[in-house]
Amino acid sequence: KKYVYAFHEGSTDLKPLLGGKGSNLAEMTRIGLPVPGGYTVTTEACIEYYEKGNIIWDELRHQIEEKQLELEKVMEKTLGDIKNPLLVSVRSGAAVSMPGMMDTILNLGLNDETAKGMAEITKNPRFVFDSYRRLIQMFSDVVLEIPKYKFDNLLETKKREKEVKSDTDLTEEDLRELVEAFKKVVKKETGKEFPQNPKDQLMMAVEAVFRSWNNPRARVYRDLNDISHTMGTAVNIQVMVFGNTGEDSGTGVAFTRNPSTGENKLYGEFLMNAQGEDVVAGIRTPRDIEELKEILPEAYEQFCEVAKSLETHYRDMQDIEFTIDSGTLYMLQTRTGKRTANAAIQIAVDMVGEKLITKEEAILRLNPNDLDQLLHPTFNEKALNDASFITNGLPASSGAASGKIYFSPEDAVKAKADGERVILVRNETSPEDIEGMVASVGILTAKGGMTSHAAVVARGMGKCCVSGAGELNINESEKVMSIDDQHFGEGDFISLDGNTGHVYAGQIETQDASLGGEFLTLMKWADSVRKLKVRTNADTPKDSAKAVEFGAEGIGLCRTEHMFFEDNRIFVMRRMILSRSVEDRKKALDQLMPMQKKDFIGIFKAMGSRPVTIRLLDPPLHEFLPSEKADIEKLALEMEVPYSRLKETVFELKEVNPMLGHRGCRLAVTYPEIYEMQVRAIMEAAAELKQKENQEVIPEIMIPLVGEVKEFEYVKELAENVIKEVFEDYDVTVPYLIGTMIEIPRATIIADEIAKGAEFFSFGTNDLTQMTYGFSRDDAGRFIKEYREKGILEKDPFQQIDRKGVGELMKMAIERGQQTRKDIKLGICGEHGGEPNSVEFCHMIGLDYVSCSPFRVPIARLAAAQAAL
Ligand code: PEP
Ligand code: MG
């Protein structure tokens, strides 16, 4: 088996075998760019190294030696030659980029003897001893595992002694002394001399790179980024070129386009008289790549050309490392450059314009989730680096927010009125907290997962939210939040990053979102290829309008319960709940009806001719009542009912498992008047718009939590009776649909029966996941984290559809539903409707649309386009 490839034997196609760096070095060699010669030890060799019990076996050693000889022949220099030694670099390079384990050793091949020989032949002893001290430093760090600072300290001491600022001001003599001092450190730390035999140095270095694959930081990085632990890393051995031979040498890194704005202009930094790590180490301040034009015009021109040709060759923005050795340019690495979401869009659209890539490729190149960055404010990156991290929770809703913390919705509302920027901190939120959430710029909870109330509502509002920050102790009545020995009280500043789930102390500067022309261009391309329609989950005219702005093609879920919390409606709603007779209840409902109707008119207007799905009341009624004694007392006074009566009602409504309790269509079985009122409000709104404004709307009335076909039939009949009445009252008819949520596993099984009466299905994958897995959506956040850490669950099923379980149930429901109603309309309105992987699944199983919160609409549009390509 071939374990070692010369650069000229490989190409990008061999990336899994040669790693990213190795395959790109091979590719650059293949297309004739100036790359110093070398060879790559394969990732397979690394895997076998581990399988064989961490040893470099004979066959491998032999193949490395053979390639080394070939290289020496071409270079007319040999490793360890005391007159004219060959020096090499040894660098790691896995198939996926892993910044956590970039181990590099430069100047390998130097020892006391070769250094002497090289000093003579180059007539530049200062450079040689600078290189030698660097070798000892890097070799000690990577191979011998001696802490870096032991060497850095000596270097700093030397500079202080000599009263110089920069490494480059140290003299040959200083560097010789440093080499001796460094060697002493090695002896002291390992009990052995610094290895003087270059061949030993080489094998030890190769082995160290293999080992680095499994160092803790590399493992953590792979865990965080879902990278397999079994791929192994390749090792690249390359002839050294030197950026530190003097003032006509240097080294740098550059991007072919600006990685933060996308501007089509070379962007990079370099240092003269320096070696690789100096540029990134921040010891000296690197200079703008453009200045190279003045210093070495020819090398600069050549570099610009190479950069351009690399971009054309790879058809993507490149991140390049280069070195200039005594005026001659060498390429040391190229790879696809990382970029911000803004830059990604700019570059993709520009490259289509330059005919470098097709529109389809442009669509596929973007990560839909990154679009979020563009729609919400983000923290200023520099400011974030200096911020003090407190803890993290789930990135429940995107954006960045700094503000003063308040522990109750009332306090939040008050503070907002006083002009404060409020962060609402709660153990968990409930519908009662809505007003506090509206008043806040960000929401932080200690409990609850990605589909908890706080998460869902915050996403709907486009507000930053971190949920389930389980390490926090939140005492709402004492108004303190603490973690370890840090305490935060009312009015203290904190900052939330809804993109990462991180929580920081103090304020961090934010920057606003901006949607440029390129964004719109790209979205237009995406819309032209996708098959799935994209609707939104919205409950207010304002959110609906926002969603339309983001490209929503309808409302897939209007959660009517949210409307009951606004203004004084909650008061009437509570009256309704407290009613002892049907008459009383109807009286209260009669008051609520016009308010709901007004809302529906507002929403219909905002949506124009687009379809609107309205769901009848879903949550258990106790959510509309307070639960704390003090709050009950206060409410009893306000409502002028005896405390005991209110308390009794609260007690009666209390359920052990409210999410499995008296909610959804079950409410209609007990209190049909509630749904009757809602259906009337919906249909009167539609009838009135038709009559007065000649606006045609087709309301889609959706019944939640159906698990038994008779439940559905019962509500449908009730609705149709009301609809008939409305048509008579108004003397018009309006087209409408009646359908159901599919969110109870049983409903997926009897979907054929349900579809006889239901004109559409909308998958409520929040509840469907909850009930399929038996994971409480409000509590599972806490242990799912551990499930993921231990590899029991790869993904949180509340975020990404569990295709195997929930997904199969969906497929069955579709198949059975279509048996009795061939053209049944199919959608999804659970939180998964805005998650790219789930959107892809929805495309695959043939849904007509996905529905998600307004701010995720662009993400869903792009994900739907990618799924269709
Ligand atoms: C669902 O269960 O997926 C759904 C959309 O309804 P809700 O989140 O309101 O329960
Ligand atoms: Mg539901």
Image (cartoon, grey):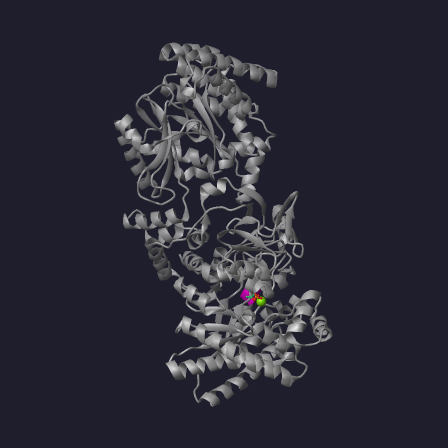
Residue 636: give x, y in percent of width and height.
67, 73
Identify whether 199 is placed above or below 400.
above
Q: Observer-nearest residue: 784 or 626? A: 626
Seen in the picture, residue 435 relative to 266 is either above or below; the reply is: below
Measured as percent of width and height from the top left, residue 15 is found at 44, 38
Picture quarter with ligand 1: bottom right
Q: Please count the marks in the image.
A: 0
Quadrant of the frame with the C terminus: bottom left
Residue found 51% across the figure and 12% down from its top:
180
Res. 818 visible in picture: no
> What main secondary structure does the magenta stretch of the protein show?
helix
Which residue is pictured at 50% across the width and 57% down the height?
419
The image quarter containing residue 732 is bottom left
201 on left or right of 266: right
Q: What range is drawn magenta here?
A: 808-812
- Along the horizontal axis of the image, is 120 left or right of 486? left
Whether residue 768 is visible, yes or no, is: yes
> Where residue 856 sits in the image (x, y, percent)?
46, 59
Q: Quadrant of residue 390?
A: top right
Q: What's the residue at 52%, 38% (across, down)?
A: 231
Q: Is residue 478 above or below residue 304?
A: below
Q: Nearer the viewer, residue 224 or 227?
A: 224
The reply, left or right, for residue 555 in relation to residue 415 is left
Q: Position of residue 731 (x, y in %)?
A: 44, 89
Figure quadrant of residue 703: bottom right
Verify whether residue 170 appears in magenta. Answer: no
Nearer-the-camera pick, 376 or 324:
376
